[in-house]
Image (cartoon, helix red, strand yellow):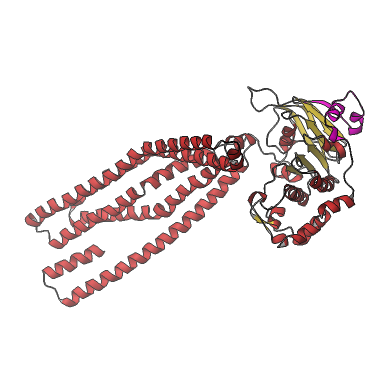
Amino acid sequence: MSPQIIGQFLEGIETKQSLEMLWRLAFLFVVIAFVEQGLAIVTTYVSEDVAWKATNQLRKEVAAHCLKLDLSFHQKYSPGTMVERLDGDITALSNFFSQLAFSLFTNLLLLGGVLVLLTVIDWRIGLIVTAIAVGTLIVLDTIRKRAEPHWQAVLQANAELYGYLEERFKGTEEIRSNGATDYVLRGLYRLQQARMQKEFGALPWLVANLTLPTAALTLATVTVFVFGDYLHQRAGLSVGNIYVLYYYVGLLGGPLWQVVNQIESIQLAGASIGRIQELRNIESKIKDGTKTPLTQGPLRISFQDLVFRYDEDEGNVLSDINLTIYPCEVVSVLGRTGSGKSTLSRLLIRQIDATSGIVSLANDGAPPTDIREISLDHLRHRIGVVTQEVQLFRATLRDNLTFFNPSITDQQLQATLTEFGLGDWLNRLPAGLDTIIGAGGQGLSDGEAQLIAFLRVFQRNPSLVILDEASSRLDPITEGLISQAVARLLQGRTGIVIAHRLKTIKQADKVIILEKGRIVEQGSPSQLANDPNSRLAEYLKIDENASLYPYPNNHEASVIAQ
């Protein structure tokens, strides 16, 4: 509309139209300009809003999908790599939506409209310019398709770089203390060099994108001037129409350069879509069950002829495991590193599935159910796990205790803390339950972090509690308080306590000793300890501090808590 008004304005001057008509055309031009700017603002806002809403939902869906994948997936990809894949790849897609989704549509619409108007003014010039524009778009699309694999390689190089950085930042203290700084920097240089090489591979396609539209616009402009002059002299084409033709050819540069200026975003978007789809196509080896047979109350656990290995080409991690753990029974699993202790807990929460054999669960008096037939959400709701590595978030103490579950009231939390002997500790905190806990438990001792983990599990009221090396880093004084927390947590529940240290047997009803993935000994702690030929007795002789002494009494624990 604007160039037509300018064309009429020029023709009005050429034909000496009235000043009033020229003022009207000028006023109409200003109004249209304001309307165009307003529409541009609205379009930008709507496109950004749509882009963030769509991609945030996609982040949520992809993250939820990855969290449901089995252990082998999470062992393959480091947290830094996953952050880049979940955020970096999807951000590239977000840029596409916000910067191009609407503008691409409007620019294609503008391009089509311009070509139609050019054809209306003069069909010969219109057809030539249309052929140039369509041919340019076809070549640009071909370049985009050829460039996408190169940008996928760039994204993968980014993910590897960020995964490397995440792991090294996490071990900064050990790297410095062991003089490995130069080694880490060499690794960083190697990954940066690999990333640079991948970007160099994509660079020629970017250069091609920049060159092609310039050539196309130059050719279209030359066409207008050459044919315009010819038609002006031979067919009476007016100066105003020649200006309109030139102006519209200039408008063609807008859509073309919009694509060119964002061509990297377009290519990254295409690459990210492929990588996101690749991630979403990964299927978990753990198939979800459908049954929900477990209720509140302690569980009975049965391992029947169980065998497990991580890879067909490797040896068994567990072999011929036949074991029954009865409701409310506390079993301590001992063994050297690599004996298969933690693998048992992973089998019970189905991070992995048995290679052969059956693991079944049941409440007291109910028929057993194969663990593979039970819904994963249902299963993991009835089983609580506390490990040595406690994951705390930068959030309030309340949120760290409840895992962001708003249905748990402050009164419930305060009652639980008091029950665990932590009422005085809570009162000493600067803001009580609103105290901010640093990421990774910053500001808390190992013992306090471990107690928060116990309290998390206690809030869920599970039927089975698994403690996997849950007190291995604690000093003896703090361990006294932890001991009481463990006793309270296991009360009325089935318990499996996995540890290297022999102190864990002091409250167990049964001791299981694993060696090379097999049960080599089981029985009550006192029975095995009093048998001079048992492995437990042998272990106790080696570790003089592992005698079966009782937990501190309540008075001692209260002194420790203070």
The picture places residue 58, in percent across and down from the top left corner, at 53, 49
Residue 525 highlighted magenta (yes or no): yes
Q: Quadrant of residue 330?
A: top right
Vertical relation: 52 (above or below) 498: below
Q: From where the camera sits, is residue 183 visible? A: yes
Which residue lies at the image location 31% right of the left edge and 52% below the top edge?
Answer: 255
Residue at the left extreme of this rendering: 234
- Residues 387 and 143: in front is 387
* Residue at 31% in and 56% down: 110
Task: Please tell me whether residue 155 is drawn above or below residue 541 in the rendered image.
Answer: below
The answer to which of 469 and 549 lies nearer the viewer is: 549
Front position in the image: 349 or 289: 349
Magenta-highlighted residues: 518-547
Q: Furthest-bottom residue in view?
A: 20
Q: Is residue 275 left or right of residue 369?
A: left
Q: Quadrant of residue 4?
A: bottom left
- Left or right relative to 498: residue 262: left
In percent of width and height, residue 445 lies at 72, 49
As for residue 512 lying within the magenta part, the answer is no
Quarter that holds the N terminus: bottom left
Q: In this orientation, does residue 412 appear?
A: no
107 relative to 173 in the view: left or right:
left
Looking at the picture, does residue 236 appear above or below residue 498? below
Measuring 75% from the left and 41% from the top, which residue is drawn there?
A: 470
